[in-house]
Amino acid sequence: MEQFSVSFTLGKGSELHGGNVSHNNREFLAGNVNDARSPLNVCFARTDIEAAYHQLFDKALAEYNARQKRPCRRIEDYYDHIDSGNREAPFYEVVVQFGDSIMAPVGSERGELAKQMLIEYMEDFQKRNPNLHVFNAMLHMDEASPHLHIDFVPFYTKGRVNGLSKGVSMKQALDEMGFRAKGRNENRLVEWERAEKKVMDQILESHGCIREDKHVTHKHMSVDEYKVMVNRKKLEQVLQARLGLSGTQRKTQQELLADLAASQQRVARLEKERRSPYTSFYFSSADKQAFVQEEMKKAGIHFRETDNGFEAPECHAKKIREIERTYKAPPSTIRERLRDDIDTCLYRSGDFEEFIRKLQEAGLEVKHGKYISVKPPYGQRFIRLKSLGDYYDEFSLKKRLKAKGRFEKRLGDAISDAKKQQKPTVPVLQEVRHYIVAVGTGKLPIRRKNHGLPYSWINDSELDKLLRLNAMLNEGMTADTIRQKAEELEAEAKKKSEELEQAEHHLRDYLIMKEKIEMVFEGKKSDVFTIEQARSAVRKYPNITAENYRNIDKVVEPAKEKVRQLAEEHQRLRDELREVTDALSIIERATNHTFVDHLTENQQRIEASEILMNGIYPGETR
């Protein structure tokens, strides 16, 4: 009976390596991807995550906002709210695999069987997990072994009184699906993973196979317990090396004893933490909670997040309160909001008098005197404009208005000149003007490119895309040449990827040889090779002796440098390719005059979700 190992790995989309939808969808190619096989990949679902959030939560969000009497408590965009927060990841990704690159490689008979079993696993995933909305799912056949990436948004529909009636929560999603924590090491995620692996076992059995358990002797360990185990192994290796080596290559007895004492202290701390009951911590400020949790991570204090804060072992309560007292609140967000309101009103005005009227229409009280002061509806007192920074005193605001007018005049002249000369930049420049009008009339919000500078037409993230495209067209590029450039960069990036892969392969060979040489001549231990294997490899090179074996570094270091340079060149090409493909997408939308319309429609959709209580958008029917 054939054996397959099973792999089921869960990650948070908000964490590094926790999930990468762009990579899964091959919007960019990593070095380990064989793009010639990419057409063999299987797509089960492919929806933009923000569209998934609209589909899932717009109705609940509209109902929630309707209950909020204070505007500051309303949530404008639920995806942004979750993505910028600290309590929940915006999505999760699970990677599922039968076998591995050695036992079930792509292209082999076992690899094809693994692919078929992954397809069967995916077919009922959504049915088994009704509270995990799958918005993206890809089966990869263009890497070393078949594997499945499933990206999903976990959501609850019950149990909330004050918050959204339907919202993001992995814990509550698993609760609603019937998974319950049975202990510290038997939490909901462990129970869910066990259930999914049981499904994988059933699929294996249906194909006459059984699971190969590669780690039958390993008990489940927490991260801290695992680190202690690793430290102990390192200590044992040093002690073993001591028995056969001498001189400066060994640790001193004092260092070994210090390592042992540190490990014992850590074990004692973990035991104390294990016995200590958990206590809850709540913070009214999300920034304060994020600060405390970050400092706890640095101090090695374990915690688990809850809907209203987090829980930590009671034995650390004193330390946590000490951390809490060191927190310093960031500069008032009232001033940040006020700067945004001022910039918005400024770029919807033609002169300074209109700017003052726009401030008042936006609900800000204006007080004239030696210095102009304003009181926003979300503030308690008047704030002098000059106190907001160098760009916000009366003189600077008037200068910014003049600069705004000069930009708009130059734009009008550029459009007239381009029309006379029948330049290809005409539609792009017209979209620039269309965008300026949309912002100026309030159809689109301001979007800073550099948040450290005040808003302007040249510090707008969306407008910057059009302006960069216009510069490319002025340099003589066209849609065809941009497309050709993209193809050339794609081919060049592929070639560089192959060179990088070959260089990495050579480097691995050199590093393996170096490890074996050091085992023979320095007595170093290896977790991969035996001393017999090392000696056998070195015997093939009789010119390597105890006097010159360190010359291996003269081979390894240049190989490392070559890999580094090729990696940088490959990344540069990928970045340039991304810019060119972005430009190609923009030129098509600009030519069709849909770039700004698309932005405006999205903005209207967001605003409609705040107003319409039944969650239906204008023009839609049930």
Image (cartoon, grey):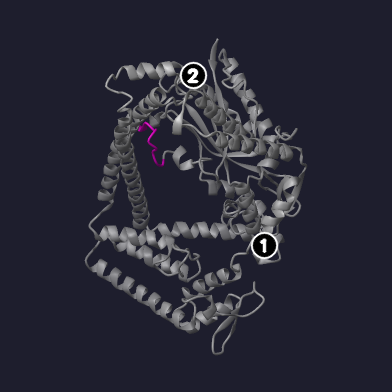
Disc 2 residue crowd, few under 14, some 14–19, many 20+, Cα 10 Å: some
Residue in view at x 29 percent, y 34 percent: 554
Disc 1 is placed on an element classified as helix
Residue type for callout 1: Arg
Foreground residue among 229 and 346: 229
The location of residue 114, given as percent across then percent down, is: 50, 21
Residue in view at x 33 percent, y 64 percent: 429
Magenta segment, prevailing SS (helix, strand or loop): loop
Mark 1 sits on what residue? 73
The location of residue 573, given as percent across then percent down, is: 32, 45
Disc 1 residue crowd, few under 14, some 14–19, many 20+, Cα 10 Å: few
Inspect the magenta stretch and tell me whether residue 23 lies in it.
Answer: no
Foreground residue among 119 and 534: 534
Inspect the magenta stretch and tell me whether residue 32 lies in it.
Answer: yes
- Left or right: residue 6 versus residue 173 is left
Residue type for callout 2: Leu
The location of residue 426, given as percent across then percent down, is: 30, 63
